[in-house]
Amino acid sequence: MSSLHENPDALTKRLTDTGLRATPQREVVFKVILEKRDHPTADEIFARVKTQMPTISLATVYNCLETLVQNGLVRQVNFDRAPTRYCPHLHEHAHFHDESTGAVHDIDVPPEVMARLRELLPDGYDASAIELSFRGAAGVRRNVAQN
Amino acid sequence: MSSLHENPDALTKRLTDTGLRATPQREVVFKVILEKRDHPTADEIFARVKTQMPTISLATVYNCLETLVQNGLVRQVNFDRAPTRYCPHLHEHAHFHDESTGAVHDIDVPPEVMARLRELLPDGYDASAIELSFRGAAGVRRNVAQN
DNA sequence: TTATTGCTTAGAATTATTCTAATTCCTTCT
DNA sequence: AGAAGGAATTAGAATAATTCTAAGCAATAA
């Protein structure tokens, strides 16, 4: 819940704090992911970034995303074989993939549930990452205008 | 734990029971998945199948896999963007992806844990599928020569 | 047997992503 | 300030898994 929205320098700082060079491309890619938290794909990010920086290339978007992911500033989310999506929420959480709308929603997972999942592993198995995702239909939403 | 290994007709029966035509190609693809439960990729399945049926095409393997999956005879397993793997275990379970060997191990998940996971979803969210996967290193294996 | 439907096949097409090689941009050193 | 060195960016080619297309073939139905 920091002030990344209000204070653009916080974003720059997060880059430099992790030892990264805060290039304009990285900043705008990072900003785009943070400002609309809808788990966009690389293509969608590319499209959004181009409106602010028309000369950027798709390869650069992929490069920036890779460095952001490798430095733990952004998370990757995969569903089946669909294009990789990018998520700015760093705390441990799961994802719900709404098949009817294509939207992806974050699902909170309490630490004790995570711990319970780890307990499922046999002795000697050490999980560096746990991925939990749901697929289905979200929001029955009776009595809500839809358009 | 049925007799699919000993009784090849059980395999045929499972195909016809689901309303599928038991073509030779489908049977051999299904057999290959069942007889070595190591979560092979489509390419690996193709290679194994070719030894028994050299004329089969990769497209057919993909077609067979698709019908098997759609009819619930085989499960698909995805890890990140790696090639899709196929799993003959139908009961609800998770997967552990060993990063050092590339192997995939099945992990049992007790029903009450599955139920606990479903409880994490907000009202109105209905999950038709839950995917749980671990990534990491399996089998610490001290005192084993490594080369 | 003929018609109909479904399956298989080879190869082309697609698509997300990565690679390559050239250029440009910073940073630092002098 | 100018030059050197390293890192980042770029356009476009390459890759790889998967899907599509069109044609032939096989099984079943009439």
Image (cartoon, coloured by chain):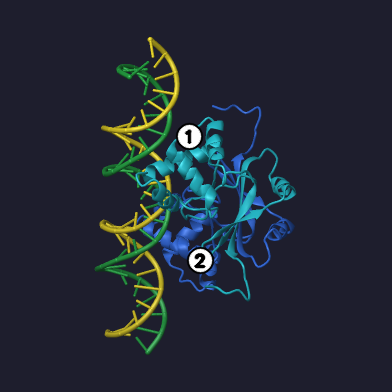
Chain colours: A cyan, B blue, C yellow, D green
Using the image as rendered, state which of residue B7 and residue D17 is in the foreground.
Answer: D17
- In the displayed structure, D15 sits above or below B24; it is above
To which quarter of the image does residue A140 belong? Answer: bottom right
- In the displayed structure, A141 sits above or below B39; it is below
Residue type (three-letter) at the residue carrying disc 2: Gln
Q: Which residue is mark 1?
A: A22
Q: Which residue is mark 2?
A: B70
Viewport quadrant of the N terminus of chain B: bottom right
To which chain does the residue with label 2 belong?
B
Q: Which mark is residue B48?
A: none
Q: Are marks 2 and 1 in contact (CB under 8 Å)?
A: no
To which chain does the residue with label 1 belong?
A
Residue type (three-letter) at the residue carrying disc 1: Ala
In front: label 2 or label 1: 1
| Badge 1 element | loop
| Badge 2 element | helix
**Residue B11 screen position, x and y as percent:** 53, 64
> Alpha carbon of mark 2 to alpha carbon of mark 1: how far?
47 Å
Viewport quadrant of the C terminus of chain B: top right
**Residue A35 screen position, x and y as percent:** 53, 50
To which quarter of the image does residue A75 belong? Answer: top right
**Residue D25 screen position, x and y as percent:** 30, 69
Classify mark 2: residues with Cα within 10 Å, few (<14), some (14-19) or many (20+). few
**Residue D22 screen position, x and y as percent:** 26, 68
Residue depicted at x 57% and y 28% = B146
Using the image as rendered, state which of residue B98 and residue B26 is in the foreground.
Answer: B98
- In the displayed structure, B37 sits above or below D13; it is below
